[in-house]
Image (cartoon, rainbow, N blue to C red):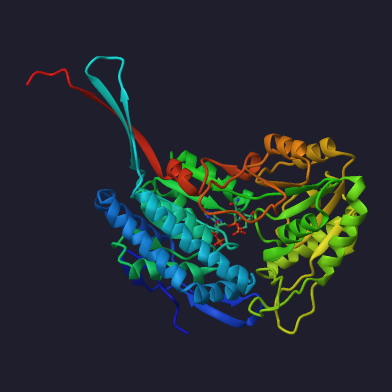
Amino acid sequence: MSAHRNYINGAWVESAAAPIVDRNPSDIDDVVGSYAAADAAQTRRAIEAARAAFPAWSRSSIQERADLLDAVGGRILARAQEIGRLLAREEGKTLKEAVGETMRAGHVFKFHAGQALRITGELVDSPRKGVSVTVQREPLGVIGIITPWNFPIAIPAWKIAPALAYANCVVFKPASLVPGCAHALAELLADCGCPPGVFNLVVGSGREVGDAIVNAPEVDAISFTGSVETGRALAARAVAGMKKIQLEMGGKNPLIVLDDADLDNAVECAVQGAFYSTGQRCTATSRVIVTPGIYGRFRHALLARTTALVVGDALDETTQIGPAVDAAQLKTDLDYIAVGQKEGARLVAGGERQPAPKNGFYIQPTVFEDVHNQMRIAREEIFGPVVSLLRARDYDEALATANDTPFGLSGGICTTSLRHADHFRRNAQVGLAMINAPTAGVDYHVPFGGVKGSSYGSREQGAYAVEFYTRVKTVYTNANIAG
Ligand code: NAP
C-alpha cells in the first residue's frame, strides 16, 4: 500500500521514514491507510514554506480568504458522510457522532469565512488636538497547530479556519493516531486553491515533528490541544522562544444533580456526558454529584440506562458506544478501574472489556459509587467511559465538591430551581457551565475553553478566536502639519 503523503509548500511530499499505519480501533485487522511520517527536516521545510508565503498571504484580500474558507466548508459539508465514515473508522466514535463532528467542521469553516469579512479596528480620539489614534488588527505570522486524536476533524478545523481567516500561515501536526482526517482536510484545502505554503500538513510523532514546530524561531504562535502533561512541557519551551501560546487540555467535569431535578433529563445528561464518544472527550462528565432526596431514583435509572447501552463497531448503525481509541487507552481505562476498586469505590456497572465479534478495543460503560472526591478516580482524567457517583448533603456541598479539582473545563447542574441554577452559573469554576444540559456538546459559534489547569491563553472558537490569531497595532496620526 503506498503511503498518503504530507503537504508541504503546495506539493504532496514522500518520506523515507517508515509510514504510520492507521488502524480501525473497532477492528484492528482493518487498515484505514498508511501515512508518510515527516521528519524534523521536512517539518523545517514546511515552516520555511509558511514563512515565505506569509508576506503575500498577509496582504490577501478579505474576499479571497472568505472565499477559500467558504469553499472548504462547503466541500466538507457535501462530503460529510464519506469523511464521517473515515473518522469513525480511524477514531472509533459512532458513525452518527462522526458525521456530526464532520458537519461541525464544515460549519466552523463557513463561520470563519464570514469572520474574515468582519475584521475591524477602532478609531479613537486623542487628548492631543489634531491627533487621531487607530487600533488595528494584524496577523501573527506562522502558526503551529498541534491537535489530539479525539476530535480529528473538528479541532483542526476550529484552529486552522480562524488562523487562515486572519491571514496567518499554518503548519499543522495532527495526532499520530488520526492522520486520515487530517489528510482529507489538507486535500480539500489544496483542491479549493489554498496558495502554496499557506497551509502545510506534517504527519509525524510529537517528539520529532511536534518538537521541531515548537522549537522553530520562525513559528510565531502555537495553538495546542491535548493532555496536560504534553501541554505544560510544550508551553515552557514555546514561552522561552517568546511565542504566543494557547493550550486546551484536560478536564474532570462534574455534573450536579439536585433533589428537584427532572429525573429523566438528569439521567440523559449523565449518560450522554459520561459515555458518548466512549468518554473520550475533554468535556466528558466524570463526576456526578447527587443530593440525598434523588440519589436512589437517579442511581437506579442511571444503572438501567448504562447497562442497556449497545457497545460495538463504530460503523454499525445500532452501536451507541464505540471502542477505546487504541490498546494504550483501553489499558488506561482498565487500570483506573482497578485503581478505583483498590481505593474502596464500589463498582456497580461495567468494569470489564466488552466481548465483541470483532477484534477491537471494546470496554463496558462503567459506574462507581461510594466515591469520595480525593480518590484518584475522582481527581485524574481517565478519558474513558468511567463515571463516579458522589453524594453531597445539599447544593452548597455539591458545588464545593464540583469546584474541588485542579481542572475547570466544563461543569453542569440539573435542577428546576432558578436560584440554584443562577448561583451555579456565577460560582462554578469552569469555562463552560451547563444548566440542565450535558457537560459535553457545545456550539461552534461561541467561545470554548476552561479555567484552572484545563486551559491557558485566550479562548478558542467563535468571534473570540480573533484574540489569539491576531495582535493589535496602535497607530497615531498627526494632522497638525503644514501643506
Ligand atoms: P497528547 O498525547 O497530549 O497529544 C496531543 C498532541 O501533541 C498530539 O498531536 C501529539 O502527537 C502531540 N505531542 C506529543 N508530544 C509532543 C511534544 N513533545 N511536542 C509537541 N507535540 C507533542 O493528547 P492526546 O492523547 O492526543 O489527546 C487527549 C487529551 O487531549 C486529553 O487530555 C483531553 O482532555 C485533551 N483534549 C482537550 C480538549 C480541550 O479543548 N480542552 C479537547 C480535546 C482533547 P502524537 O500523537 O504524535 O503523540
Figure quarter occupied by ligand 1: bottom right
Which is nearer the eye, 340 or 129?
Answer: 129
Which is nearer the eye, 1 or 377?
Answer: 377
Give the image quarter of residue 351: bottom right
Where in the figure is residue 175, as x and y percent of width and height? 54, 63
Q: Report the number of discs.
A: 0
Where in the figure is residue 223, as x and y percent of width and height? 48, 49
75 to the left or right of 391? left
Q: Which residue: 42% across, 51% down?
A: 162
Q: Is residue 359 above or below residue 248?
A: below
Q: Is residue 57 above or below residue 236?
A: below
Outermost residue on the top side: it is 128
177 to the left or right of 196? right
Q: Which residue: 41% across, 45% down?
A: 469
Q: Specify whether residue 370 is in view.
A: no
- Quadrant of the snapshot with the C terminus: top left
Q: Is residue 218 above or below residue 76?
A: above
Q: Which residue: 78% across, 60% down?
A: 386
Which is nearer the eye, 400 or 16?
Answer: 400
Where in the figure is residue 211, as x and y percent of width and height? 49, 54
